[in-house]
Amino acid sequence: MSYCKFRLSLLLAAWVVAGGVSGWAQKSPTIQLTVDATQAPMKIIHTHMILPVASGQAGHILTLYYPKWIPGEHAPDGPIINLVGLKITADGKPVRWRRDLLDMFTFHVHVPAGTKALDIHFDYIEPAATSGFSAGASATDKLVVLSWNQNLLYPAGYLAQKIIYDPELLLPPGWKFGTALPVESQSGDQVTFKPVALNRLVDSPVIAGQYLRVVNVTPPGEPIHHEMDIAADSEAALDMSPQLKQDYTNLVAQTGLLFGTRHYRDYHFLLTLSDHVAHFGLEHHESDDSRVDERSLISANRRLLMADLLPHEFTHSWNGKFRRPKDLSPPYYEQPQETDLLWVYEGLTNYFGDLLAERTGLWTPRQYREYLALDAASLGPGRPGRTWRPLQDTADAAQILYFAPAEWTNWRRSVDYYGEGDLLWLDVDNHIRELTHGKKSLTDFCHLFYGGPNLGPQLKTYTFDDVVSALNQVAPYNWRGFFLKHLRSLSAQPPMGGITRGGWKLVYTSKMPQLLRAEELVRHFINAEYSVGLLLSDKGIVMDSVVTMPAYKGVIAPGMTVVAVNGRKFTPHVFNEALTATTTSTGPLRLLVMNDDYYKTVSMDYHGGPRYPHLVRAPGTPNVLGENMKPLAP
């Protein structure tokens, strides 16, 4: 959005022209920020700001913003609804403010003449819902993840990097913390950080808790410090095996080889282990904010499911933070972001995140191939929506797709530039190997595109043309045409070029992949998408019904409940046994389904049994994929 989009008084408009425009080139007065998290177990955080008022602002209207477009979340999802108790005073007297009528994240403050500073108080209510990225549940009785953007306001008229804060954090007694933010001093539970620009502050969350463990994962000889700051709801959950510690140390070493440089002062993996917070991963330049189940380090299945999470978020330090699409890099947090290049930002990161999970030992080679097979199958036949919504539109529409309902995902499509981007960039990698007769790979692109000296966290934007140009420097080819073909494709089939060029092919068997079995056990669902086209909860609730597949043709839709299978009460075991029996039975598979208050019996003439995707070697072809999966050598 343009800087001045609001219908304000002529007085405010004059201030924007006279002060706001010139403000882009200068720093704002330093803002004192105190965030009191001592009541985090009660799910409430207190903010106190002291905002100096410039001489030209006193007696006029000052516009304050609450951050709206949160970096990495690709949507205007700043949790403004959780800001409560806003009170502004000057010299101890209340100051009148009013919310903008067109933008709920904007406040107009009538600054009294002679005011030197504004005292701003408000509370942030930590939500209970375990959804919504960083705006989801972020505090429990034993821990909190503090995202600074939720606990501050900032003045209009300045670039984010020109607004300086003096941040201070108060924690519950005895709680420890981890963050990439440099510390000025600490006195008991009061932490004072060094003055920092708004963009760096928002990019540096804090993890804190009663149970917190710091694990050094810096490889031998690596000059830059790397650590894992892990907070959990129990001390037992912090038990990381020596092998897992080594795998994450390998991750640090492999990223150094992949990109050839680093662009941060040090790096903190911020890992939250709790069943009561939102589960996701969010990238930051010198840290990440990753949240998983409480037992994820000590449960084999949960550890398997989180294996690619930290590699993905760590890769973002280069692809997403150091290098970022220009349209995703507005100068402040109220301006809309254009998400059309997320197939690079997220797709390429997804490719490297999964590959790094295998190269470092977090996944075995077989598990990585299972992931690729499941990824390909989920996009076709699992995504008939590909026939109307191309990959490009999943990126263009990211801000609405992130929050779309889970029902009908196969037909609506979701943020598929993650999974489809994985296959697309695998194709690019293997294409480069083919074009250069094995002499180059996507690693050469990374050294070129993400290289340069380590000057600490900085932003270097790029465009589609920049990506194409860099690839052409590595391996000349019609990369523009290559990408546009894939981005615009309405084929029902996923892009399989990377797998086939890698010497493998996709097949379906009755054997369930280990990754899928772990997911079914942990997430409590049944995946029959590639047989009858159903995704069911372990209670029989239809989570999705794949358009064109037998269940959909039998008029089964999301939201219905499977009550019985072949006349017997539904359980996961009963359903799976009946599905297996379809290979030998002559009769139909019969499901008793409840739709709202009504029951109906659906008969499916299906005899294929369970079907699960796998990769197998293509005879007579070189194993390029196997070569690609080998850890990079120093």
Image (cartoon, rainbow, N blue to C red):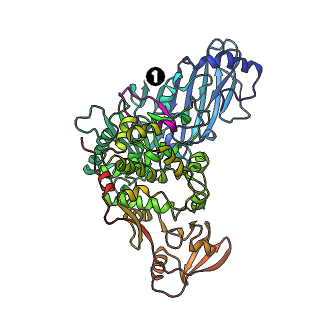
Q: Quadrant of residue 215?
A: top left
What is the quadrant of residue 15 in the picture? top right
In the shown orientation, is residue 265 left or right of residue 562?
left
Q: Quadrant of the N terminus?
A: top right
Q: Is residue 460 magenta?
A: yes
- Secondary structure mostly seen in the magenta stretch: loop
Q: Seen from this angle, which residue lies furthest left?
A: 220
User: Is any part of residue 381 visible from this angle?
Assistant: yes
Is 487 or 145 nearer to us in this picture? 487
Write down the quadrant of residue 387 in the picture: bottom right
* Residue 199 horizontal side relative to residue 225, left or right: right
**Quick check: is 161 in the magenta stretch?**
no
Residue at x-position 55% and y-position 59% = 491
- Residue reaching furthest to the bottom: 586
- SS at mark 1 in the image: loop
Q: Is residue 298 left or right of residue 279?
A: left
User: Residue 338 location, x and y as percent?
Assistant: 59, 39
Q: Amino acid at mark 1?
A: Pro
- Quadrant where the C terminus is found in the figure: top left
Q: Position of residue 249 (x, y in %)?
A: 28, 43
Q: How many marks?
A: 1
Q: Determine whether 148 is above or below 27 in the image.
A: below
Q: Which stretch is magenta?
A: 449-466
Q: Is residue 431 above or below residue 10?
A: below
Residue at 70%, 13% (x, y): give it: 113
Q: Where is residue 425 shown, x and y percent of the image?
A: 43, 49
Q: Which residue is at 56% across, 81% downward?
A: 605
Relative to 269, 596 lies left or right: right
**Which residue: 28% across, 51% down?**
630
Q: Is residue 516 above or below residue 4?
A: below
Q: Is residue 215 visible?
A: no
